[in-house]
Image: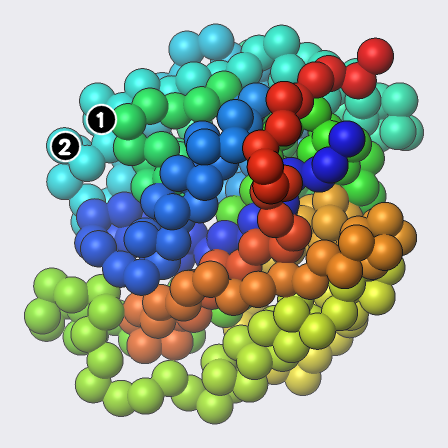
Amino acid sequence: MPLTPVHFFSHGSTMMLGEESTSAAYWKSSGDEALAHGLKGVIMMGAHWDAKGDAIEVATNPDPGKSPVAYVHPEKYLDYKLNPDVPTSRRCVQILRDGGFDARENPTFEWIHDTYLILIRMFPDGCPPTTLISTNARYDPHFHMKVGATLRPLRREGYLLIGSGGAVHNLYRNIWAPMLKYSDNFAQETPPEPWALDFRQSVEDVLTKTNGPKLRRAMTRLMKHPQYRDAHATDDHFMAAMFVAGAAGDEEDEALGSYGRLGAETWELTNMCNSQFTIGRWPEPPVKWVAAG
């Protein structure tokens, strides 16, 4: 059975939900392509939810609410109906436990914009069945890569795995004044700073020029990059990239020649780089996805 692609999406600030951009257009086209190929559901790791200790959690709230979104009119998200895939979520818990993780259900988790922003943009006409996976608060890159590798077989069944984080995402180094002055998160009175440009280029190089196990090794090395701490004041928004490298960095992915491609990119708040990457492609012609037996 062929494999679904894997996305590493930079969700940016909350304002990416309210404003049109090339990234928003790419999210929509990615969702359209997934629907056209009969995706079974979405399995996503975001950046704003972490589990303490050694645990990893999977959302099993059958009717989750949405955390409020700053700088975005409520009409953009309040009426969007979330679609938690509780059976698949419980299945993911078991798969992760079988893989050696302390995986737990979280039946009370309310969804946050890092995930539902992407879902609204990808699937504006209706949310597909979706499973949300937490990060772990220790932010160990190898841990999160193994999570992706453990769930990778679900790509054979028609599940779309997505990491929602950031290529360059440091709220402390953003320049907020133009947004406040012009009410425009894309306003730039000055170019992005060199550290942001340098790290952004390194992320693109890793995702587009390495694959298979080399991708996994290169992705973890980015956390030792001289500009990493400028680009990421905290590690939370880079764990999604590790998840993606695990999900799309197997020897089989290398044999298939599955390299990442940069689908779109949006700079906001001067120094935040929202790069959108896809590794692999949907099979042509579309196939009928079946569960592993």
Residue 130: percent from left, percent from top: 51, 24
Q: Residue at x 31, y 53 (%)?
A: 25
Vertical position of residue 174 compared to residue 68: above or below: below
Q: Can the viewer see residue 165?
A: no
Residue at position x 19%, y 74% from top?
187
- CA separation in Å, label 2 and label 1: 6 Å
The residue that disc 2 covers is 75
Q: Total marks drawn?
A: 2
Mark 2: give few (<14), some (14-19) or many (20+) Cα within 10 Å.
few
| Res. 85 image quadrant | top right
Q: Are marks 2 and 1 in contact (CB under 8 Å)?
A: yes
Question: Would you place residue 113 above or below residue 172 in this image?
Answer: above
Residue 175's spot in the image, x, y percent? 30, 75
Quadrant of the snapshot with the C terminus: top right
115 horizontally vs 184: left or right: right
Q: Amino acid at mark 2?
A: Glu
Q: Which residue is mark 1?
A: 78
Instruction: Give the crowd class for mark 1: few <14, some 14-19, many >=20 residues within 10 Å.
Output: few
- Residue 284: in sight, yes or no? yes
Image position, residue 227 (x, y; %) = 61, 81
Q: Is residue 58 above or below residue 262?
A: above
Residue nearest the viewer, comparing 238 with 127? 127
Quadrant housing the N terminus: top right
What residue type is disc 1 on?
Answer: Leu
Residue at 35 percent of width and 71 percent of height: 267
Q: Secondary structure at mark 1?
A: loop
